[in-house]
Image (cartoon, rainbow, N blue to C red):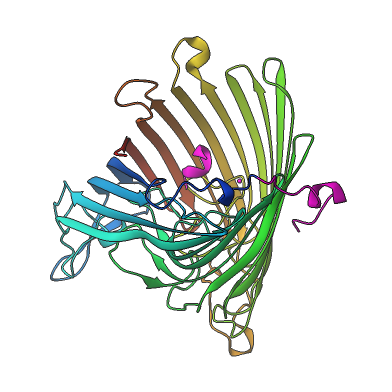
Amino acid sequence: MFQRLLFTATLACGTSVLTETASADNAQAQATGFIEGSALDLNLRHYYSSQHTKRSTHLVIQKPGGNQPTRTRETWVQTSMLKYSSGYTQGLIGFGVDASLFSAVTLDRGHGDVANGGDRVLVNGNGDALPTWSRLGVGDIRLRVSGTELKAGRLMTENPMLRYKDNRALPSSFQGVALYSNEWDRLALQAGTFERAIPRTGTGAERLTTTFGNRAYTGERISYIGGTLKPGYGLEASLYASRFENMWDQTYLGITQRSGDKAKVALKTAFNYYHTRDQGDQRLGYIDNNAYSLAVTGTHLAHSVTLAWQQIFGDEYFDYVWESTGNYMANSLYSDYNGPNEKSWQLRYDLDLAAYGLPGLTATLWHAKGWNIDGTHYDGDRNGRNTGYNVRGLDGAKHDENGLMVAYTVQSGRLKNAVLRTIVYNHRASGGQIDGSYDEFRLVGNVPINIF
């Protein structure tokens, strides 16, 4: 969720955009060859987290006689991500492959430290941490014609409907087929269909389920189509539609406008909207909700201030596929502020210390608050449907969080582009809000190495 802080129908606004085709020197025309265009990269990640629960929130330690509550959890993992990408063969149709091997070593294996089982480290049936684990994180074959690519296999997708999650020691990925088209300079299109998720903490593929609903129910696949249009004048618009089979249909609209100059004042306004409606067998029951957010960011030199408002209209959670961050809403931080009928706001301050002689050093400070979470009118299980969302007990629930993130990116030398990031946050919940009450400290280091 923190990656929202780090890192957003596509129908024409005018015929000039759709008729502006790519130049004769399209991407495939510039292919250098399968071997000649190959690259091998290694990313070494060090992940440490210390988490403490507050109020009525507890974690559990698995014991032979039953689960024992605890208030602390320590996670300490060293991972490596080895990625090979071939070039494209030359000719009208280019062929290429990608393969990434992910592996992890659990440095803190204390039975009590790895509370709550395999949420952050892989554990066995007794709740003991496995010393090591590994998997094929990415593995695909790809074809390219002009500026359009077709990929099949395990992919790290990135769009408002299905985006890989990377807030643990290893990222997730998804198994299926995706199409990417960049035939026009200002229009990028995507389509895909995926059947399995490869979880962040795991070694194999799992059926697709939901993040906030009843995970006993799964959908056959998620399919999506959409794209992003950049007509100029600082405007960007995205429109996507997806179907999570027998679970829900979902549409997304995002509009961003940028203007001004940060030497004086630059302004960014971002609007995001999702509509979700039950589909097919309605395995999560009836669903009908709308989620809106509006964020305005003002930037002057090294300083940026963001004020965001978000609201959910509906008697269940605004939801997305488990192991993804298919959520481009403004208030997606530690919590997503996506409870039934929830209102929330966020105030964030970003500082780039390059202006003060410290290039590569950045800081982000934020406060967010959500309230009016009300699931008392939930009737998604009417007419004998499944109870997809257990929200009837939420009546006036609320929560808030405060966070600080400091990151440094090495600017030169052998460790150039290595990143060290630390995050400190607290979150307090009441009235049964799902995310609970925690204090947490995270330290994450990434060292990218280009082998060839």
Q: State left or right for residue 350 relative to residue 216.
A: right
Q: Is residue 55 above or below residue 235?
A: below
Q: State left or right for residue 194 relative to residue 119.
A: right
Regarding residue 272, the answer to whether it shows in the image is: no
Name the foreground residue: 89 vs 410: 89
Which residue is drawn at the image coordinates 18% and 66% (left, top)? Answer: 124
Find out whether residue 416 is within the magenta segment. Answer: no
Find out whether residue 9 is within the magenta segment. Answer: yes
Q: Quadrant of the C terminus?
A: top left
Q: Return the x and y of residue 99 as percentages of the image width and height.
A: 35, 57
Name the foreground residue: 386 vs 99: 99
Which residue is drawn at the image coordinates 39% and 35% (left, top)? Answer: 423
Regarding residue 260, the answer to whether it shows in the image is: yes
Which residue is drawn at the image coordinates 58% and 55% (left, top)? Answer: 159
Query: In terms of secondary structure, what is the magenta stretch mainly?
Result: loop
Name the foreground residue: 318 vs 391: 318
Q: Return the x and y of residue 417 as percentages of the image width and height.
A: 38, 29
Q: Return the x and y of residue 7 as percentages of the image width and height.
A: 52, 40
Residue stretch in magenta? 1-24
Name the foreground residue: 345 vs 333: 333
